[in-house]
Structure formats: C-alpha cells, structure tokens
Amino acid sequence: MNPADVEKLFEGIPRKKICFLPTPLHKLENLSRIYGVDIYIKRDDLTGPNPFGGNKTRKLEFIFANALQENIEYFISPGGYQSNSCMQLVTFCRIFGIKPILYLADVINQGVPDEYKGNLLLDKIMGSEINFVLKDYEGPNINPLWNKMMDLCNKRKEELQKKGYKVRVLPSGVVDPEGLISYVLAFKEIFEQGECKGLKFDYLYHTTGTGGSLPGLIAGKILLDSDVKIISIACNPYGPNDICSEDIICDRTETIFKKLNVEIPERSNIFNEIHIDQNYFGEGYGIPTDEATLAIQELAREEGIFIDPVYTGKGFSGLLDHIRKGKIPLGSKVVFLHTGGSGALFSEVGLTGALTEK
Ligand SMILES: *Cc1c(COP(=O)(O)O)cnc(C)c1O
C-alpha cells in the first residue's frame, strides 16, 4: 500500500482531532556527527495540546470520539504518581467536559507525596480527582500493585454506575483497542516525512511500556511494506506475567488489522517484527537509572532537547548504547520516536547522581 491507501483505511472511523499533526521530524546534527550515525528525532512530545504531551494523545483522539458517542461522563484510570498517560487523559477530559478520576500508585515507595510536582502537579492544576494508592511491600515488582489499582478503578466504576452515571475505565497507558490504530498513522507520518527528505530509515527506535504504540508501528510498517527495523527499548519488564508481552503485542497488531478491515498477516510475520530490548529499565518501572540520566544530559547538552527519566530517557540510553556497541552500523539512518513525558523531569523521580557538571 502507499500512504494514501493507508489514510483511506481510516475513513469513517470516529476521531476527535486535537493533536498538532504532523509532528516535526528533524535531524540531530551534533549527535550524528559525534556518533557517525544519522540520527533523526520524531517529535511526538509535541503532539499537544499542552507542551507536556506525548504518545497517549494520539490514542485519545480515537478513544474520546467513541466515548462521546456513548455519552460517557467519567473516565477512571490508574498510573504511577508521575503518569504521563493520566495527565494526557485529564487534558482530554477537560477539553470534552468529561470528569477524570485517577488512581495513582506509589511505584517508588515514597509514601503520600507532601508536594505536588511534575505531572501530578499538572493533574492537580487541571482539577482532577486524585487518589493515592500506596505500595505496601518492598521491591520493584509492581504487578500486584497494578492489579490492586485495576480493582479500585473497577469498584469505583460500579459505584458510579449504581448512581446512574456512564463510566469507562481505561487501563494504564490508556491501552484500549480503539486507540491502537493511531500509531499506524504515526508510522505513516514518519514514512512520508522520510520520503520528503529523500530518506529511507534503517532503524526506528522508541520506548515501549504498556505496549500501546508498538502494535500500530508494526502494522504501519507491514501495510507500507517498509524495510525499517523497529527496535523497542522496554521501560518495564515484558513477559507473560507482566503488564505486556510479545504475545499481547501480536494480539493487538491483529486487532488493528481487523479494525482497519485488512487481511491479517501470518502471526509469525508479526512476531518477526518485534524486537524488545529489556536491558535498559534498570530496577523497574519509574526507577531512575544512571544511563537514562546521562542520556537525558547528552541530548540536552548537544541538542537542547529534553527527554524524561521514566520513558524516553531509558529508550534513548538504549539507542546510544546500541550505537556505541556497534549494533547499529556506522552511516545508518536512525529515527528516534520521542514519545514525550518531559513533565516527569520536574518530579521526585528525576535524575540520579550521575548528572555531571561539565
Ligand atoms: C506511555 C509512554 C511510553 C510507552 O508507550 P506505550 O504505548 O505504553 O508502550 C513511552 N513514552 C512516554 C512518554 C509514555 O508516556
């Protein structure tokens, strides 16, 4: 298919256009010179409508179009205190007059925050209802906490429904079947912007978390018959008992093909497109790493661009490490998908002591 054919697949699918699209794609001149690899960046941190957005905003365009048709009155969603996803959800709720309720988990065992910072502060300014959920055990495994959060969200939904309200719960990362297709269009944008510059990218790097963006990227790649290799750096563990797994990515990619009314490829063809590197999340989700701190510093000092400690800092640290280790041949053309999240830079998650004075 060509990009126009892909665009046509979306005709008739409800969507509330809020994002500033296409987001820019530009070269990182200084880092490209330093590393001998042409590094480009796709600025999905600039999806809008506020400057702290990111990849969830694309998904919410589709989710909200559907919710408005169903006259939804409340959205409930879980996340960490610094959830970028929840902040974007609250933004959309405010735009469309739907009430937001957040259950925010203490993923780094800090207790109830005595100050609102970063994305939590933004949630507060936008007037969202916020409920803190404490982690009553030690260790980086957040799966039990995540299950508890979903229970709390669902319980609250039942309570509100009993009172006659229309309520929807969005899982963490606003991973909802309706939103998955949005990253097909994001892939198409990258593809077209590359073509405009006469470029064919060899690699597309991004950070994967709840697995809401990767399926769309894979579907976009298959639909457009692109040769780019998609490399996902995980910001949390992936596996059968975790928040996402390769099997789930495959299922969701199939869901996208169904939704777009296109024949579903062989499952093995989808599986072959999944390359998730789990070496860069450190101790776990939301826990800062020295490598991410240094990557945040390097991108800021060479290019004046900010990434975040929870997601994109870890993703970018993976990209730089792959280049240093020669996994990406010199002269390759790489695009890093900046999925946003910079609000968390102003939070307690922050940076490690690795930040240098230089
Ligand atoms: C959610 C998020 C990711 C991960 O994307 P998924 O769709 O959850 O895999 C990456 N970066 C930022 C800033 C995010 O908020």
Image (spheres, rainbow, N blue to C red):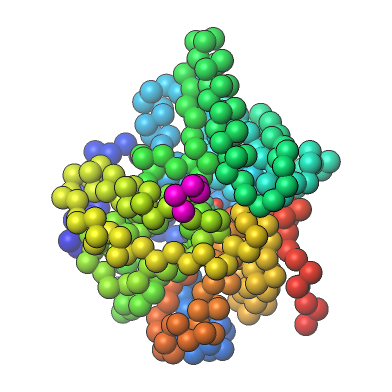
Q: Is residue 105 magenta?
A: no
Q: Nearer the viewer, residue 321 or 9?
A: 321
| Residue positioned 54% across, 72% down in the render | 318
Question: Which residue is farthest top?
Answer: 163
Quadrant containing the N terminus in the rendered view:
bottom left
Q: Position of residue 337 (x, y in %)?
A: 47, 65
| Left-right relation of 254 to 308 | left
Q: Is residue 87 visible?
A: no
Q: Nearer the viewer, residue 168 or 91?
A: 168
Quadrant containing the C terminus in the rendered view:
bottom right
Classify residue 67 by image quadrant: top left
| Left-right relation of 287 to 246 | right
In the picture shown, does residue 155 fall above or below 43?
above
Q: Position of residue 107 (x, y in %)?
A: 68, 46
Q: Is residue 150 visible?
A: yes
| Residue positioned 48% across, 55% down in the render | 238
| Residue positioned 42% across, 77% down in the render | 334
In the picture shown, does residue 199 fall above or below 276?
below
Name the dominant secondary structure of the magenta segment. Answer: loop
In the picture shown, does residue 292 fall above or below 208?
below
| Left-right relation of 312 to 217 | right
| Residue positioned 73% across, 38% down in the render | 136
* Callout count: 0
Q: Position of residue 301 (x, y in %)?
A: 67, 77
Q: Position of residue 102 (x, y in %)?
A: 62, 33
* Region in magenta: 239-243
Q: Nearer the viewer, residue 284 or 5?
A: 284
